[in-house]
Image: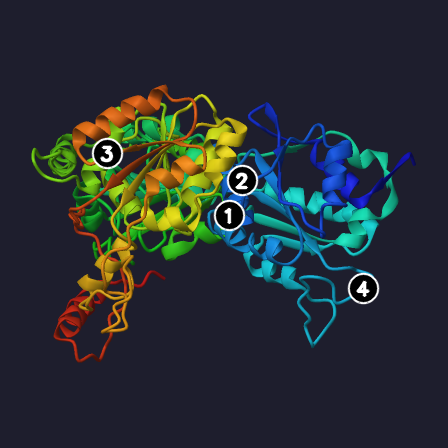
Amino acid sequence: MTTIRLTVAQAIVRYLATQYTERDGEQQRFFAGMFGIFGHGNVTGIGQALEEVGDDLTFYRPQNEQAMVHTAAAYAKAKNRLQTLACTSSVGPGATNMITGAALATVNRLPVLLLPGDTFANRVPHPVLQQLEYTLGQDVSVNDAFRPVSKYWDRISRPEQVIASLPEAMRVLTDPAETGAVTLALPEDVQTEAFDFPASLFEKRVWKVRRPLPVEEDLVEAAELLRSARNPLIVAGGGVIYSEASAALDGFASEFGIPVSETQAGKGVLPWNHPWNVGPIGAAGGLAANRIARDAELVLAIGTRLADFTTSSKTAFQHPDVKIVSINVGSMDAHKLGATPLVGDARATIEALENRLRASNAPTRDVTPVAALKSEWAAAVDDLIRPRAGESLTQPQVIGLVNEASSPEDVVVCAAGGMPGDLLKLWRPLTPKGYHVEYGYSCMGYEIAGGLGVKMADPGREVYVMVGDGSYLMLHTEIVTSIQEGYKLTIVLVDNGGFRCIRELQTQSGSPAFGNELRYRDEATNRLDGPTVQVDFARNAESLGAKAYTATTAVELGNALSAAKTETITTVIYVPIESQERVRGFEGWWDVPIAEVSDEPDVNAARVEYDAGRAKQRWFT
């Protein structure tokens, strides 16, 4: 056997550079590069390897370990999970900083490879700097905390172990049903150890991403349910977009006259003005989709996890005999809500169902009732986003103005707080990749790092990052990385004085406002209910190298958005919001428990409403 003598770190870098994916005959390199922040646990291992043998693996230096995982996840999402980036850190805090990003990637089924440094396998110098000493065993480090948030986890304690572990890591990363964060913990001494690796390990390998079909019996059963349904509804999730099934869904819905509702991950799968697109569904949904969902006797869920926001915490579907058919490449998701499972690729399965329905002369349906609901919903959106002369801007109006200024191929990015719910209702995308909101983990701080990942995946698109002041203060440092690498973002920073979304949830639940606003402490009450803390966000952005504008009116915001298009560097548009007008709910519900016992009358009243909502919840078996 021909061998090549390399360190473990050099072998890993060489291996990653030769991995490719292929779907529908199109190949691409799987790892577009590696993010890294170096310390004593990886600088002489992975760092040395990247410098010496990493020319085919572009290295990026971010500002924060959590942020680099978010960027990699966003990149993978934008690339339909066919390409991603790896992330390396040192031991200790560098490693644990990545755990939140790992959880986000796994929750959202997005492939990222994490290579945290670990303490010495030989244990000679223990305890080393940043080591956690675990009294019940010496084989535990902080990297074991990655286990529950990783789809595959391994610790490389001997050089030859990478020969088996690296292909396993790739198998999981490229499996649409199993993908998520993959963690290979790398003891710092092992990274530098040499071994005679088989030369074949470093040959180009193509991982083929197949389009599996459900078994025939399930297809026949699902087709019959669809053929006989009088009021069906499609719930389109992110799996439709990852499968590049928009055209197939368009043809299917149009031919048989089935309304299509959207989840956060599925928004944009059809243009917002498509005659059969009834808009967002669920707790943050719109009136068209939610009214159709209420009466649907058959729900065809495609590529969705059917999370609580989508199902209005299992109150969305109120037909007494409602049945669920679920298309999903993952068996767990396909079986949710007692569904008839169609375990398979979204595009291939839609096409297979279409052929069976066409052969059985399935009925088509009149679009007129759907058009009436769409018209009512469009009017509600128009009213919310329309600026009013002489009045301060509201968040919905800011969203409308940014949407109006953007082009069909541009991308809006968001993640947490009240903004995602408002965007789901109000943003009007025309392309499947025009809407990028991370809501599986709803992670504050994802926005700017995620926007960077989207821009890296497709530099030709303008990327609009919508972020609140709370999320911005948590993790805005990748502004520096975007400028360093020349990836321009337009960041619209809406300032409402703290965690206003949760404050609203708090007060709507009967509690007085407490602990969610950015205020000074009042010495008299010893609570954070003093004057508002003023932060100069525009100067903060400028200090990081960005161009900054401040906009307090619709005209100023329009001018700032126009100016931002001509800028070549990341631009922050600061929009202070005085009005707290938000988008009301449209016949959706979200299960947020209210205190069962309280001395607050408003809490007791909210509990009564909560119990009424719970009464509509259904068991699906």
Question: What amino acid is labelled 3 in the image?
Answer: Ala
Question: What amino acid is labelled 4 in the image?
Answer: Pro
| Residue 211 appears in the figure | yes
Q: How is the image coloured?
A: rainbow
**Circle 1 is placed at which residue position?**
105
Which residue is the extreme one toward the right?
1
Q: Kindly indicate whether the residue at mark 1 contacts the one at mark 2 (C-beta within 8 angstroms).
A: yes
Q: Toward the viewer: 22 or 324?
A: 22
| Residue 349 appears in the figure | no
The numbered mark, 1 or 3, whose residue comes first in the sequence reads: 1
Which disc, if any, is residue 551?
3
**Inter-mark Cα distance, 1 to 3:** 34 Å
Q: Nearer the viewer, mark 1 or mark 3?
A: 3
The numbered mark, 2 or 1, whose residue comes first in the sequence reads: 2
- Quadrant location of the C terminus? bottom left
Image point (27%, 59%), residue name = 519
The numbered mark, 3 or 4, whose residue comes first in the sequence reads: 4
Q: Nearer the viewer, mark 3 or mark 4?
A: 3
Residue 433 coordinates in the image, percent (x, y): 39, 30
The numbered mark, 4 or 1, whose residue comes first in the sequence reads: 1
Q: Toward the viewer: 39 or 272?
A: 39
Question: What amino acid is labelled 1 in the image?
Answer: Ala
Q: Is residue 516 above or below residue 201?
A: below
Image point (51%, 40%), residue name = 71
The numbered mark, 4 or 2, whose residue comes first in the sequence reads: 2
Q: Is residue 218 left or right of residue 90?
A: left
